[in-house]
Amino acid sequence: MKSSNENQVYTPKEHIEAAASQLLKEGKKKVNNLYEEGIHKATDVEESIKEYSDHILKKIQENPLSSVLIAGGIGFLLSKLMKK
């Protein structure tokens, strides 16, 4: 004996609605996956920036004179480039 679902004939409108609904579900799933992936990558970037800034801070504390001279040199070069 066949179930009632097997005997059901879909109209073109119902077929399009079902396809659109399926497409919407898949789209939402894809967007959600991309969102989660973006959050994960943003967290990774945040952690990397924190690590690099801690590393730079440690280097500055170890060699303050070199750090000041390097910063001054960079500032001087930038000022020369901006004048051109």
Image (tube, grey):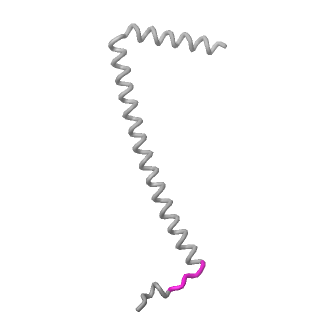
- Residue, far front: 1
Segment colored magenta:
8-12
Where residue 3 appears, x then y in whole percent? 42, 87
Where residue 12 appears, x then y in whole percent? 60, 79
Q: Residue at x 49, y 88 (%)?
A: 7
| Residue nearest the viewer, comparing 69 with 37 | 37
Horizontal side of 69 relative to 15 (left or right) equals left
Q: Residue at x 48, y 54 (%)?
A: 31
Where residue 67 appears, x then y in whole percent? 41, 12
Q: Residue 66 appears in which quarter of the rendering?
A: top left
Our reading of the magenta stretch's main secondary structure is: loop
Q: Residue 4 appears in which quarter of the rendering?
A: bottom left
Where residue 10 appears, x then y in whole percent? 55, 82
- Residue, far right: 84
The answer to whether 70 is drawn above or below residue 6 in the figure is: above
Q: Quadrant of the C terminus?
A: top right
Horizontal side of 81 relative to 36 (left or right) equals right
9 drawn magenta: yes
Q: Residue 16 appears in which quarter of the rendering?
A: bottom right
59 drawn magenta: no
Q: Residue at x 37, y 15 (%)?
A: 60
The answer to whether 37 is drawn above or below residue 3 in the figure is: above
Number of residue marks: 0
Q: Residue at x 54, y 10 (%)?
A: 76
The answer to whether 7 is drawn above or below residue 51 in the figure is: below
